[in-house]
Amino acid sequence: MAGRRTNLALLALLVLAFVTGLVSWLVGSALVRWVVIAHGIVGLGIVVLAPWKRTIARRGLARRRPGRGTAIALAVLIVSSIVAAIIHVTGIVRSVGTFSPLGIHVATAVAAIAVGVAHILQRPVRPRMTDLSRRNLLRSGAILGAGAAGWLALAGVLRATGARGAGRRMTGSFETGSGVPTGMPVTQWLHDSVQELDPASWRLHVLDGARTYPVDELARFGDTLRATLDCTGGWFAEQEWRGARLDRLLDGAVGESIVVRSVTGYSRRFPRSDASALLLATHVGGAPLSAGHGAPARLVAPGHRGFWWVKWVAAIDVSDEPWWWQPPFPLT
Ligand code: HEM
Ligand code: HEM
Ligand SMILES: Nc1nc2c(c(=O)[nH]1)N[C@H]1C(S)=C(S)[C@@H](COP(=O)(O)O)O[C@H]1N2
Ligand SMILES: [Mo]
């Protein structure tokens, strides 16, 4: 049955799209380029299968039975997600009210995975050993090949038309306010709110408060770093940051990981050996940080997506837990 194989291929592509999408937020190194490209190819592979799935859906819809609503909801979510993704990629529309095409893409994709599980439970497909035949593997290769052709065609059209989307970073983010800190969006991960802290009374607590620093003392370290803040919301900015390197603040402290905690409770954990690459910034672009961007001090974590760049830092400690002993994404 061609329908069965199409459904199984869709399942594989959906899982791969979901995984590569999430991994593209977790990888900070240059490897992210390949993850993002793989994500695009897999996602467009789903579009390639659309004509076959349309036939299956039409046949299925003709037989009214329970599970129909789930199937239709899934179709609406997947189509919305892919349309939003392509709008994001072109850069033609950057916001729809308070939403961004990328935000809509990810939200509908996450919802589609949940509804997709229900759809598969209501319309089960039993895999067979022969699904892994040479012939079917070649067919899978052809789907990915068509997805790759689609990806190249889209990239070519963007370049030829000079669309904004052609000039994005390897993560897919758009340049916004490089060298102009006031031009950077103020972004919170989930529901933190901007903290207005009094720099005169604020203190950084290091190593369980064994060392405390007022903001001007941190600024006097004078360590500078050019680094790119790249938010998973789809924008990035390169700035000149100034403050104190963590290897200087943590000099002599022994442990597996460094925990950087915000006054809001938001925190991230890094390998102890990363200290010299991390900066606790008090200044950006030659001026003190604004409240929105994390004053009196915020972390600068080159090679990590924005959600690692803890704002309104309260404390920096070392711990015996390994750095990966934390949720992959912040939970607040
Ligand atoms: C892009 C994701 C998918 C969308 C948008 C989608 C949508 C639909 C729709 C609209 C129908 C017809 C409604 C009905 O049967 O009542 C349907 C039927 C069906 N779907 Fe999906 N589906 C998707 C993925 C999958 C996957 C991954 C599987 C299984 C691995 C699957 C298995 C089936 C089966 C077995 C039917 C019934 C076909 C028939 O009875 O003729 N679908 N799907
Ligand atoms: C059902 C799952 C998903 C599908 C079918 C899907 C599909 C797509 C498609 C077709 C594109 C356009 C690719 C291109 O032309 O370059 C895209 C882009 C993108 N998706 Fe997804 N996606 C899914 C889930 C996710 C998730 C869970 C995330 C993040 C957590 C994500 C993040 C992104 C990003 C950042 C882009 C822009 C990449 C670029 O700039 O090329 N996606 N997605
Ligand atoms: N305390 C705290 N720090 C945080 C966040 C947050 O929600 N709370 N959001 C992070 C995210 S997702 C990003 S992209 C950057 C954004 O920095 P900006 O607002 O200075 O542009 O801050 C990070 N630091
Ligand atoms: Mo972010």
Image: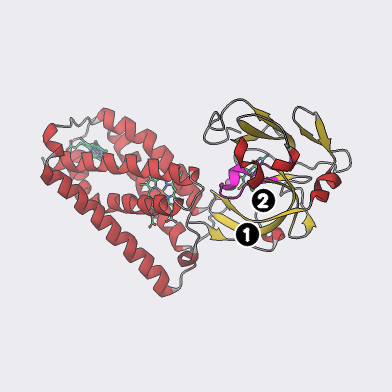
Location of residue 16 with respect to 160 vertically, above or below: above
- Mark 2 C-beta to ligand 3 under 8 Å: yes
Residue 287: x %, y % from top left: 79, 58
Mark closest to the chain's N terminus, 2 or 1: 2
Assign a secondary structure to mark 2.
Answer: loop
Quadrant of picture, ligand 1: top left
Circles 2, 1 touching at the beta carbon (< 8 Å): no
Disc 2: which residue: 186
The amino acid on which the numbered mark 1 sits, given as a three-letter code, is Glu
Location of residue 115 with respect to 155 vertically, above or below: above
Disc 1: which residue: 238
The figure's colour scheme reads secondary structure
Location of residue 240 with respect to 231 vertically, above or below: below
Q: Is residue 108 visible?
A: no
Quarter of the figure with the N terminus: top left
Q: Residue at x 22, y 30 (%)?
A: 124
- Mark 1 C-beta to ligand 3 under 8 Å: no
- Asked which quadrant contains residue 273, the reply is top right
- Magenta-span inclusion, residue 188: no
Number of marks in picture: 2
Q: Nearer the viewer, mark 2 or mark 1?
A: 1
Residue numbers of the magenta segment: 299-313
Residue 299: x %, y % from top left: 68, 44
Q: Furthest residue to the top?
A: 320
Q: Could you tell me what secondary structure mostly forms the magenta stretch?
A: loop
Residue 38: x %, y % from top left: 35, 51
Gap in angstroms between the C-alphas marked 2 and 1: 15 Å
Q: Is residue 153 visible?
A: yes
